[in-house]
Image (cartoon, rainbow, N blue to C red):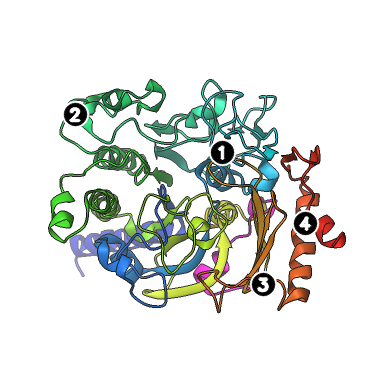
C-alpha cells in the first residue's frame, strides 16, 4: 500500500473513532425534560380516551398531537393533581403535599387570603404568599425547588407561561427567584388579562385589574395572535438557544390555557360552531385545539434540532375542568371539588427508548410525584429520595423496579373558596372523603364506581375505619391546618375524633 493510501485509512479510522466517541457521549447526556403543563384541562377534554371507552366528550374535541403522543408513548389513566392551581404547582416544585406545604388555595395579593366568607366556618391562616426559595418570607413555604436542583445537574431551566407560585411583591412571584434561568411571561397571576394580542394580553378590554396583564410579550402587542401561539414561539426560541449552548434543558411549558377568560381562538372556532357546539363550548374547544397545536410545534422543533430522541415529554393538567364547562362524565365533580372530576387529570409521557409505544398504565400517582421523578431522570437519585411526600414513578415509566400498588395519596382543602372544605385519601381502589362542615364521610370504590355515586360507609364499615385512621394519622403527622367552626368555637376535628365519638 502506498503512503497516501495509508494516510487516508488512518484518517478514516480516526474519524470513525471520533464519531463513535461522540455518539457514546451523546447517549450519556442526561435527557432534556419538557413538562407541558395545561391549566384547568379536564380528564375528558381531549380526543384521547382516558376512560375505558371513547365518550361523547372525546368526540367533541380535536387534539391530534395528544393522540400522536399517546400512540408513541404511555398514557396514564389515573394521574392526580390538587383540585386547584397553586397547590398543584407548589407540590410540583417541592415534592410536598398541599397539607404539608399549606399553600392550599390560589394566591395573588400579599398577605391576603383568596377565601370567601362562610357562615359556618373560617378558613385557617394558610400560606397565602405561596412558595419561596428564600427563608424568612411571611406566610410562605420555604423549600429548595425542582429547577434549583436540576441546575445542580447542569440543566438550563426555562419557564414559559403561567407561574402562579407566589403572591405579588414576594420573591416567589418571579420564577427567576425560584431557580429558573429564563422566565417568559410568568408572574403572580393565575390567569391572563386576555389571550388576544390585539388587546395586548391585558384585562383592560374587560375593565379588569392590571394584575392580570401578561408581562414580557410586548413585541406581540397589537398583533393578531393568540397567547398560546406567542408563548410557543418564545419557548421554541429558548430551546433553540439551550441546544446551541449544548446544555441539557428543562422546559416548563406552562400554558395559561384553558383557564378563564375564555376567548375565541379564531383559527379553530368556526369549525366547532359548524359542528353544532354552542358559543361557549366552541370557544373552549378551540382553545384546547390551540393548546394541542402548541404541543405539536414544540415537538416539531425538538425534531428539527435533532434532540427529540434524548428528550422526555410529559403532558399533564394542574386540576380538573371548571364548573362552567361540559363536565368530565363519567367522572363526578369539577375543579375545586374532592371528586374525580376535580382531581383526576390527563397525563401522557414519551421517554424515547424507555416508555413503550401506545402503552397504557392504570397505576395511580399524584402531582408531587413529578418532583422526584424528574430528579431521578436527571441523575439526582439521592435528592429524589429526600422528597417528603412525592415518590418517583420511573418504575412505571420503565417497567423496571417496584412500585407500591396500594400506596395512600392525600388531598387537603381547608378553605372556603367556592367549595366547602374537605380532606381525602385514596388507597388502592378505595377513596374516602371527609367533609369539614357537616363532618360527613363518603367512601367509594373507584374500580367499580368511577362516578362516585354510591357511598359505601355502611356496607364497608371496616374499610371506612381503616381509611379514617390513615387520613387522620397523616393530617396529624403534617400538622394539617383545619378550619374554625363558628358553632363550636373550635377547630374542626380530624376525622378519627368524629368516628370515635359516634
Label ID, residue 406: 3
**Residue 354 in view in this figure:** no
Location of the N terminus by quadrant is: bottom left
SS for tag 4?
helix
The answer to if 351 sits in the magenta stretch is: no
Q: Residue at x 26, y 61 (%)?
A: 61
Residue denoted by label 1:
148
Question: Mark 1 vs mark 4: which is more N-terminal?
Answer: 1
> Which of the two labelled residues, at mark 3 and mark 4, occupies the earlier sequence position?
3
Q: CA distance from mark 1 to mark 4?
A: 37 Å
Residue occupied by mark 2: 198
Q: Residues within 10 Å of mark 4 (few under 14, many from 20)?
A: many
> In what element is the residue under mark 3?
loop
Mark 1: give few (<14), some (14-19) or many (20+) Cα within 10 Å: some
Quarter of the figure with the C terminus: bottom right
Q: Position of residue 334 (x, y in %)?
A: 47, 55
Q: Sequence-wise, which precedes: disc 2 or disc 3?
A: 2
Category of crowding for the residue at label 3, using alpha-carbon neighbours closer than 10 angstroms: few (below 14), some (14–19), many (at least 20): few
Amino acid at each position: 500500500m502506498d503512503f497516501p493510501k495509508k494516510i487516508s485509512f488512518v484518517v478514516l479510522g480516526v474519524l470513525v473513532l471520533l464519531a463513535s466517541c461522540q455518539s457514546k457521549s451523546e447517549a450519556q447526556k442526561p435527557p432534556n425534560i419538557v413538562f407541558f403543563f395545561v391549566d384547568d384541562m379536564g380528564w375528558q377534554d381531549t380526543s384521547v380516551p382516558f376512560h375505558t371507552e371513547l365518550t361523547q366528550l372525546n368526540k367533541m374535541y380535536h387534539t391530534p398531537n395528544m393522540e400522536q403522543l399517546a400512540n408513541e408513548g404511555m398514557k396514564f389513566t389515573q394521574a392526580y393533581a390538587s383540585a386547584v392551581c397553586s397547590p398543584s404547582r407548589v407540590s410540583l416544585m417541592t415534592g410536598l403535599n398541599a397539607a404539608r406545604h399549606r399553600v392550599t388555595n390560589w394566591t395573588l395579593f400579599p398577605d391576603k387570603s383568596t377565601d370567601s366568607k362562610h357562615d359556618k366556618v373560617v378558613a385557617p391562616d394558610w400560606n397565602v404568599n405561596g412558595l419561596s426559595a428564600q427563608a424568612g418570607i411571611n406566610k410562605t413555604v420555604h423549600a429548595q425547588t425542582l429547577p434549583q436542583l436540576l441546575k445542580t445537574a447542569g440543566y438550563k431551566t426555562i419557564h414559559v407561561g403561567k407561574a402562579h407560585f407566589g403572591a405579588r411583591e414576594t420573591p416567589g412571584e418571579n420564577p427567576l427567584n425560584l431557580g429558573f434561568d429564563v422566565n417568559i411571561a410568568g408572574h403572580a397571576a393565575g390567569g391572563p388579562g386576555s389571550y388576544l394580542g390585539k388587546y395586548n394580553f391585558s384585562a383592560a378590554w374587560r375593565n379588569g385589574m392590571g394584575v392580570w396583564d401578561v408581562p414580557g410579550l410586548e413585541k406581540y402587542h397589537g398583533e393578531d395572535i393568540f397567547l398560546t401561539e406567542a408563548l410557543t414561539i418564545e419557548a421554541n426560541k429558548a430551546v433553540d438557544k439551550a441546544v446551541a449552548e449544548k446544555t441539557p434543558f428543562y422546559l416548563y411549558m406552562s400554558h395559561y390555557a384553558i383557564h378563564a377568560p375564555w376567548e375565541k381562538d379564531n383559527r379553530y372556532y368556526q369549525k366547532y360552531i359548524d359542528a353544532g357546539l354552542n358559543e361557549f363550548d366552541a370557544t373552549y374547544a378551540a382553545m384546547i385545539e390551540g393548546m394541542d397545536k402548541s404541543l405539536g410545534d414544540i415537538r416539531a422543533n425538538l425534531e428539527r434540532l435533532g434532540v427529540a430522541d434524548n428528550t422526555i415529554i410529559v403532558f399533564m393538567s394542574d386540576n380538573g375542568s371548571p364548573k362552567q364547562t361540559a363536565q368530565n362524565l363519567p367522572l363526578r365533580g369539577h375543579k375545586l371539588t374532592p371528586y374525580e372530576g376535580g382531581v383526576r387529570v390527563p397525563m401522557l409521557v414519551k421517554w424515547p427508548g424507555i416508555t413503550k409505544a401506545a402503552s397504557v398504565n392504570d397505576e395511580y400517582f399524584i402531582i408531587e410525584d413529578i418532583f422526584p421523578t424528574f430528579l431521578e431522570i436527571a441523575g439526582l437519585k439521592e435528592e429524589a429520595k429526600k422528597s417528603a411526600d412525592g415518590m418517583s414513578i420511573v418504575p412505571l415509566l420503565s417497567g423496571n423496579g417496584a412500585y407500591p400498588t396500594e400506596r395512600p395519596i392525600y388531598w387537603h382543602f381547608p378553605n372556603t373558596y367556592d367549595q366547602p372544605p374537605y380532606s381525602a385519601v385514596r388507597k388502592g381502589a378505595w377513596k374516602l372523603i371527609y367533609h369539614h362542615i357537616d363532618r360527613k364521610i363518603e367512601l367509594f370504590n373507584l374500580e367499580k364506581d368511577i362516578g362516585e355515586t354510591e357511598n359505601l360507609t355502611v356496607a364497608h364499615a371496616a374499610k371506612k375505619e381503616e381509611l379514617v385512621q390513615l387520613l387522620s394519622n397523616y393530617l396529624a403527622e403534617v400538622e394539617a391546618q383545619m378550619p374554625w367552626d363558628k358553632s363550636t368555637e373550635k377547630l374542626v376535628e380530624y376525622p378519627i375524633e368524629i368516628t370515635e365519638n359516634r
